[in-house]
Amino acid sequence: MEMKGLKKEIIEFSNERDWDQFHSPENLAKSISIEAGELLECFQWNNNYDKSSVCEELADVLTYCIMLADKLDVSIDDIVLEKLEKTKKKYPVDKARGVSTKYDKL
């Protein structure tokens, strides 16, 4: 399923339940953070994670991200590609390859 089909399924699911009324950009951003915390919890004490649990939490994060992009009327492809272009400039290959140094310290 492509992103448009996935987005359609998510929006349809929400609309069937009349949940859009709760999905302000602020609430969706909060939900992303909450679900990201639950994703992080899967790795809290060691790296012996349960892949199924990780995938469920990752799906929650992605779902809320897709919903927020829809609410803001932005293209996920466009905003990710625009950010990637900015990040390429911050982290040129010749300086950033193989290192995890922050861009302002390269």
Image: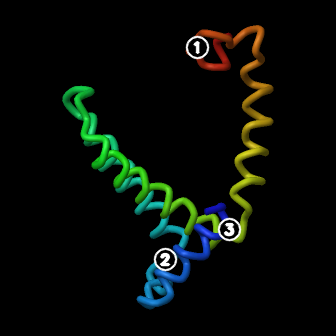
User: Which residue sits at x=55%, y=69%?
Assistant: 25
- Whether 99 is drawn above or below 5: the answer is above
Q: Measure how far apart labels 1 and 2 are at the Cα level.
A: 37 Å
- Residue position marked by numbered label 1 in the rendering: 101
Q: Which mark is residue 75?
A: none
State which quadrant residue 60 falls in. Answer: bottom left
Determine crowd level at label 2: few under 14, some 14-19, many 20+ residues with C-alpha closer than 10 A: some
- In the picture, the quarter occupied by the N terminus is bottom right
User: Which residue sits at x=23%, y=29%?
Assistant: 48
Q: Measure how far apart labels 1 and 3 are at the Cα level.
A: 36 Å
Q: Amino acid at mark 3?
A: Lys
Q: Position of residue 4 (x, y in %)?
A: 68, 68
Nearest the viewer among 44 and 104 is: 44
Left or right: where 30 falls relative to 50: right
N-term mark: 1 or 3: 3
User: Which residue sits at x=72%, y=64%?
Assistant: 74
Q: Amino acid at mark 1?
A: Thr
Q: Position of residue 98 (x, y in %)?
A: 61, 9
- Whether 20 is drawn above or below 45: the answer is below
Nearest the viewer among 2 and 21 is: 2
Q: Amino acid at mark 2?
A: His
- Residue position marked by numbered label 3 in the rendering: 4
Q: Position of residue 49 (x, y in %)?
A: 25, 35
State which quadrant residue 102 falls in. Answer: top right
Q: Measure how far apart labels 2 and 3 are at the Cα level.
A: 19 Å
Q: Position of residue 77 (x, y in %)?
A: 73, 54
N-term mark: 2 or 3: 3
Helix, strand or loop for disc 1: loop
- Residue position marked by numbered label 2 in the rendering: 23
Q: Are marks 1 and 3 in contact (CB under 8 Å)?
A: no
State which quadrant residue 83 falls in. Answer: top right
Helix, strand or loop for disc 2: loop
